[in-house]
Image: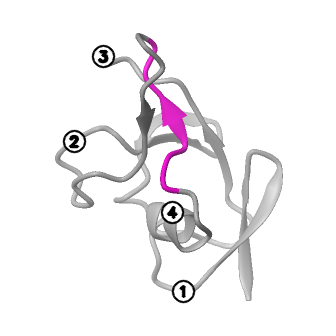
Amino acid sequence: MSHIVVDGEPLPFTEGQTIAAALVAAGRVAWRTTRINQRPRGVFCGIGVCFDCLVTIDGIGGQRACLVSARPDMTVTTEEGDDE
């Protein structure tokens, strides 16, 4: 099974899964909080309309985890959001 690295830890994924799907499959339903009030966020719409599932992928921030397919050895870092 292939792995991505999330916040320094290996996370298995199945070919064809998005990063959000891999996180949810591993039991992570929230992986960031908003700047104001620290409200938990994860995948909400699942189709790229909202920005609740933002992560940093291979050093590029502000990417929607529900739109990016997981690739072996991809580095994902969770982050703080900009919304309330």
Question: For the residues marked 1 and 3, what is the alpha-carbon distance in whole angstroms?
Answer: 34 Å
Q: Earlier in the sequence, mark 1 or mark 2?
A: 1
Mark 3 lies on residue: 84
Determine whether label 2 and label 4 are within 8 Å by CB.
Answer: no
Question: For the residues marked 1 and 4, what is the alpha-carbon distance in whole angstroms?
Answer: 11 Å
Of circles 3 and 2, the one toward us is: 3
Label 2 amino acid? Cys
Residue 34 located within the stretch drawn in magenta: yes
Q: Which mark is residue 50?
A: 2
Mark 4 lies on residue: 19
Q: Position of residue 4 (x, y in %)?
A: 70, 65
Residue range of the region highlighted in magenta in the rendering: 29-35
Colour scheme of the picture: one colour
Q: Nearer the viewer, residue 24 or 61?
A: 24
Question: For the residues marked 1 and 2, what is the alpha-carbon distance in whole angstroms?
Answer: 24 Å
Q: Quadrant of the C terminus?
A: top left
Q: Position of residue 36 (x, y in %)?
A: 41, 10
Label 1 amino acid? Glu
Looking at the image, which residue is at 47% across and 77% down?
A: 17
Question: For the residues marked 2 and 4, what is the alpha-carbon distance in whole angstroms?
Answer: 15 Å
Mark 1 lies on residue: 15
Q: Quadrant of residue 28?
A: bottom right
Q: Earlier in the sequence, mark 4 or mark 3?
A: 4
Determine whether label 1 and label 2 are within 8 Å by CB.
Answer: no
Label 4 amino acid? Ile
Residue at far left of view: 49
Q: Quadrant of residue 3?
A: bottom right
Q: Nearer the viewer, residue 30 or 11?
A: 30
